[in-house]
C-alpha cells in the first residue's frame, strides 16, 4: 500500500513538473515575441529619415535632462499666482522626486536591461549625453508623466497639454536611441502611478461649491421624516434612484413616499399635488424631476430637500447634498438656505437652459470624462458637436441697453455664475448671487471650428473672440431665424423665437448642510 502511494506521488510530481515546464516555455515564447516587437519598433524609428526628428528630438530630450523642463514649467505656474497652479506645481515636483528615486535607484537596479544599439540612429539625432545606466524603465518618461499627472490633478485644464508634452519627451527617448519603446511605456506607467498615489496621501483640494458662502440657517430637526413627502422617479439614473429607497426608509420611517413611473402619468401634476399636502417636499430623480419639484415647492412656499439619485446630480452636488449620507444628515438636522432660480419664458430652471448643440455637448462630455478626463472629453465632444446643425442668429440685450448680434452653434444660460470661464462650465461659485451666466460660442465656419477645438485643447477658449460671456440678472434674446427648441435642465421644451430670461433671487428654500468651517 505504501509503495503504491509513493508511486502515485512520483507520478503527480512528474505531471506538475511537466505542467510548470510547459508554462515556463509558453511565457518565454511570449516574452521573446514582445522583445522582438520592441526591437523591431525601435529599429523602424531609428531607420526613419526625418529632418524634423533630427532637429527637434535631441533638443527636447536635452531640455528634459534632470527634469529642467518640468522645473521651468513649475516656476511659470507658480508665477501665475493662482492657488491651484501653485499646488499643481508643488504636487508635480514632489511626484518627480519620488518617481526618479524609484526609477533610478530601485527599478534600474532590479532590471539590468542593456541600452539599445545606436548604430542605426542617425548621428545628428543622437542624444547629446549617452546614458550609462541600464535601460528599464525610462527615467525621463517616468518623470515627465509624474509631473504632468501630478500638476493636472490640481489643475485639470493642463492635463492634455502637459500629457502631450510628456508623450513627446517619451518618444524623444526612443528617437534619440536612449531607450526601447517598452522602457518608455513602463516609465509612463510608473509616473502615473506615483502621481495617483500622491493624491491618496495628500488629497486634491477640491472647490466646495457653496458651503463656505451660502447662508445656512438652523431649522426644525426631523429625525423620523414626519411631514416630509418624497417624490421619486425610480427609473432615474439608470435605476439608481430606486436603489436608495431602502436606506431612505430606514433613515425616515415616517416619510411619505410617492413613486412616479406609471404609464400616462402626469409627473408634474403628481408633484404639485404632493407639494400641496406636506411640510417639506423631497425629491429623488434626474434634473427634470428636480426642476418640477423646485417649481412646486416654490409655489407652495415649502422647503425642498434633494436626494442625489439622478445620473449627474448637478443641483444636489452644488447644494452639498452629495453623497446620500450628506443629504440624510442635512434633512435630519433641518438646516435650510435660500437659493436663486432661473426663469426662461415663464418656466423656471434650477441649473441651465440652452439652445443649439449645448445639451448634446454636456451629455457627450460627461459620458467620456470619467474615462479620459474632463479636458480631453471636452475636446472630443467639441469635435463631435461643433459641426452639427446650422448656425443660430441671436440678438442679445442686457439691462444696460447694450445689444450684441451674433451667430452661434452653442448657447448656455446658467442659474448662477459657473466656473471655470470657457465653454465647459463645471460648478457654481454660489447659488444666491442673483446672476444668470450667459455664454455664446459662434462656430459657423470650418476654420472657426478648428480654432475653437484648438482652444479647448489648450484651455484658452475663454480668450477666443468667437466666445462671449455675460453675467447679469436679466436678458432678452431675439432669435430672428427661429423658432428653435429650448432645453431646460436637460429636458427638451417648446419651440421659441424669443428668449426672456431672468433670475428669481432667493426664491426657493432648500434643505442644505450646515456651513463648513473655513480651512
Image (cartoon, rainbow, N blue to C red):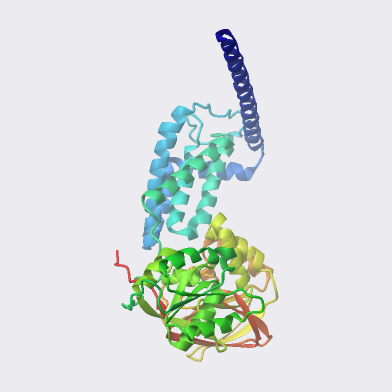
* Up-down relation of residue 15 to residue 154 (above or below): above
* Up-down relation of residue 465 to residue 153 (above or below): below
Find residue 224 and report its image quarter. bottom left
- The answer to whether residue 459 is seen in the rendering is yes
Residue at the (66%, 76%) spot, across then down: 263
Where residue 281 appears, as percent x and y from the top left, is: 46, 79
Residue at the (61%, 33%) spot, across then down: 121
Query: In the displayed structure, does residue 149 sit left or right of residue 224?
Result: right
Residue at the front extreme of this rendering: 1
The image quadrant where one finds the C terminus is bottom left
The image quadrant where one finds the N terminus is top right
Camera-side residue of 394 and 308: 308
Find residue 266 and report its image quarter. bottom right
Camera-side residue of 367 and 165: 367
Where residue 103 appears, as percent x and y from the top left, is: 44, 36
Residue at the (31%, 77%) spot, across then down: 218
Where residue 144 appears, as percent x and y from the top left, is: 48, 45
Residue at the top extreme of this rendering: 3
Where residue 349 appears, as percent x and y from the top left, is: 53, 81
Number of disc labels: 0
Camera-side residue of 291 and 95: 291
- The answer to whether residue 421 is seen in the rendering is no
Amino acid at each position: 500500500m505504501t509503495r503504491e502511494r509513493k508511486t502515485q506521488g512520483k507520478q503527480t510530481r512528474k505531471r506538475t513538473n511537466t505542467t510548470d515546464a510547459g508554462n515556463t516555455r509558453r511565457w518565454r515564447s511570449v516574452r521573446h515575441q514582445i522583445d522582438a516587437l520592441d526591437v523591431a519598433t525601435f529599429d523602424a524609428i531609428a531607420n526613419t529619415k526625418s529632418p524634423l526628428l533630427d532637429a527637434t528630438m535631441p533638443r527636447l530630450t536635452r531640455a528634459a535632462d534632470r527634469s529642467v523642463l518640468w522645473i521651468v514649467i513649475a516656476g511659470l505656474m507658480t508665477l501665475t499666482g493662482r492657488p491651484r497652479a501653485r499646488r499643481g506645481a508643488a504636487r508635480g515636483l514632489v511626484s518627480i522626486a519620488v518617481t526618479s528615486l524609484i526609477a533610478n535607484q530601485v527599478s534600474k537596479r532590479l532590471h539590468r536591461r542593456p541600452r539599445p544599439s545606436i548604430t542605426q540612429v542617425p548621428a545628428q539625432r543622437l542624444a547629446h549625453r549617452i546614458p550609462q545606466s541600464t535601460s528599464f524603465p525610462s527615467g525621463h518618461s517616468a518623470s515627465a508623466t509624474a509631473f504632468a499627472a501630478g500638476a493636472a490633478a490640481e489643475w485639470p485644464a493642463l492635463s492634455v497639454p502637459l500629457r502631450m508634452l510628456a508623450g513627446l519627451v517619451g518618444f524623444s527617448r526612443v528617437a534619440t536611441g536612449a531607450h526601447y519603446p517598452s522602457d518608455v511605456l513602463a516609465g509612463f506607467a510608473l509616473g502615473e502611478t506615483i502621481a495617483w498615489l500622491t493624491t491618496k496621501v495628500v488629497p486634491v483640494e477640491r472647490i466646495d461649491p457653496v458651503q463656505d458662502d451660502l447662508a445656512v440657517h438652523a431649522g426644525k430637526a426631523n429625525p423620523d421624516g414626519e411631514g416630509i413627502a418624497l417624490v421619486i422617479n425610480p427609473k432615474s439614473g439608470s435605476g439608481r434612484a430606486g436603489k436608495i429607497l431602502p436606506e431612505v426608509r430606514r433613515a425616515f420611517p415616517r416619510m411619505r413616499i410617492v413613486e412616479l413611473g406609471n404609464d400616462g402619468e402626469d409627473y408634474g401634476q403628481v408633484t404639485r399635488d404632493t407639494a400641496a399636502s406636506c411640510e417639506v417636499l423631497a425629491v429623488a430623480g434626474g434634473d427634470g424631476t428636480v426642476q418640477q419639484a423646485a417649481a412646486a415647492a416654490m409655489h407652495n412656499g415649502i422647503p425642498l430637500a434633494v436626494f442625489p439619485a439622478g445620473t449627474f446630480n448637478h443641483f444636489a452636488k452644488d447644494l452639498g447634498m452629495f453623497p446620500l449620507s450628506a443629504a440624510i444628515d442635512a434633512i435630519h438636522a433641518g438646516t435650510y438656505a435660500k437659493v436663486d432660480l432661473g426663469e426662461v419664458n415663464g418656466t423656471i430652471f434650477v441649473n441651465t437652459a440652452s439652445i443649439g448643440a449645448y445639451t448634446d455637448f454636456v451629455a457627450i462630455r460627461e459620458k467620456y470624462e470619467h474615462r479620459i478626463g474632463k479636458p480631453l472629453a471636452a475636446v472630443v465632444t467639441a469635435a463631435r458637436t461643433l459641426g452639427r446643425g446650422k448656425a443660430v442668429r441671436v440678438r442679445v440685450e442686457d439691462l444696460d441697453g447694450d445689444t450684441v448680434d451674433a451667430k452661434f452653434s452653442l448657447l448656455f444660460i446658467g442659474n448662477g455664475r459657473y466656473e471655470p470661464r470657457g465653454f465647459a462650465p463645471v460648478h457654481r461659485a454660489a447659488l444666491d448671487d442673483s446672476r444668470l451666466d450667459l455664454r455664446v460660442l459662434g462656430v459657423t465656419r470650418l476654420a472657426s471650428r478648428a480654432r475653437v477645438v484648438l482652444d479647448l485643447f489648450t484651455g484658452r477658449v475663454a480668450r477666443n473672440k468667437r466666445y462671449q460671456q455675460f453675467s447679469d440678472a436679466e436678458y432678452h434674446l431675439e432669435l430672428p431665424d427661429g423658432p428653435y427648441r429650448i432645453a431646460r435642465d436637460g429636458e427638451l421644451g417648446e419651440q421659441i423665437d424669443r428668449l426672456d430670461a431672468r433670475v428669481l433671487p432667493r426664491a426657493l428654500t432648500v434643505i442644505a448642510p450646515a456651513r463648513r468651517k473655513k480651512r
